Amino acid sequence: MHLIITDARGARTRSLHLSGARLALVGCMLALGFLLVAASLYHWVFVKGAREGWPVFGALVKLVAKDEFDERDKFMRANLDAMAKRVGEMQARMVQLESLGERVMGLAGLPASEVPKADGRGGALVGARNLSLEELQATLDDLERVAGQRSDWMTVAESRLFDQHIRKKMVPTHAPVTGRTAGSAFGWRLDPFTGQSALHTGLDFQADTGTPILAAAGGVVIAQEFHPAYGNMIELDHGNQLVTRYAHASRTLVKQGDLVKRGQKIAEVGSTGRSTGPHLHFEVLVQGVFQDPQKFLNAGSGKAADTVAAISRTPLVAQQNAPPAGR
């Protein structure tokens, strides 16, 4: 394109030559300028019209804003409904945990009535109507509070159950000699040496020399010595003034102060001391008083602790210094 520009008098002239590329560039710049001017004018007119309440422009702005608010409200409502559904599911889980917590509390010997409960604002409220943001926040706060309380109670129950488990392990219900039935029982009998009536303070297990002697419960070795009547003897302290005694051993494998586990081999059967043949003489003492070991051996794992408590409340049946009856 070739352009000739002259002034009014025609005295001066200028000529411009525009190629196709230059012409396209000029056109783009002009179009961009028009767009910027139009956008600025559009913005100024609509903002001014909305602020000053022009009849047409004000209505258009309100319509556009209403559509935007509706879309935003729809989006928020969809998210709130999804969150409310999850909260309802969480509250249903909390109800299940509440039932489980009551059973666990009962097993631990704690009052189930003190298990913290939710206030019931859960699934029914979510399903009945739409929750507001404030109601949803209040429900979440309630769930957090109850979950924290139940966590504390579960910790207490765990501690109580662990204590019961340890106590059961410390009760002599494990047979000190496996595969053998008890011989001479606990109680009054004719002494094999004197032929007179005497109290047999323990339970005898006839076995071959060298047969393993096992700890009836976990405890601490408080005595490992040779006794004129008991021979090679071991005493274990199980706590709560509960002691077991293992007599007439041919060989002892633990020493005073050792910690032993339930079922651990601590000695071997023999016939030392006041004995007529190889056997284990097994005794149980509660508060220094001889008790019938068979009651402990017969007690189930779930009743062992109750058995000890019941025996400790019964009248004393013999003094610790009663003469041991050999075999």
Image: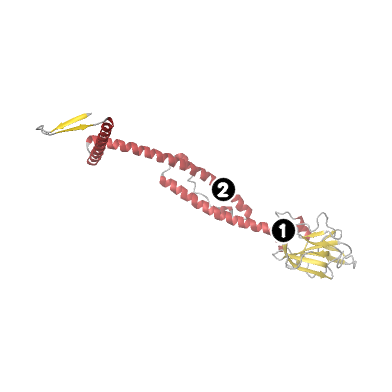
Location of the C terminus (image quadrant): bottom right
Residue named by callout 2: 97
Mark 1, residue position: 307
Position of the N terminus, as image quadrant, is top left
Which-is-in-front pick, marks 2 and 1? 2
Q: Position of residue 284 (x, y in %)?
A: 77, 63
Circle 1: residue type: Thr
**Residue name at image x 67 percent, y 56 percent:** 165
Element under disc 1: helix
Figure quadrant of residue 26: top left
Q: Is residue 101 left or right of residue 170?
A: left
Q: Is residue 305 left or right of residue 83?
A: right
Residue 277, how many percent across, how many down? 89, 62
> Do we see residue 141 in this rendering?
yes
Q: Residues within 10 Å of mark 2 (few under 14, many from 20)?
A: some
Whether pointer 2 and pointer 1 mark residues with C-beta atoms closer than 8 Å, the reply is no
Where, by quadrant of the figure, is residue 196 drawn? Answer: bottom right
Q: Earlier in the sequence, mark 2 or mark 1?
A: 2
Image position, residue 122 (x, y; %): 49, 44
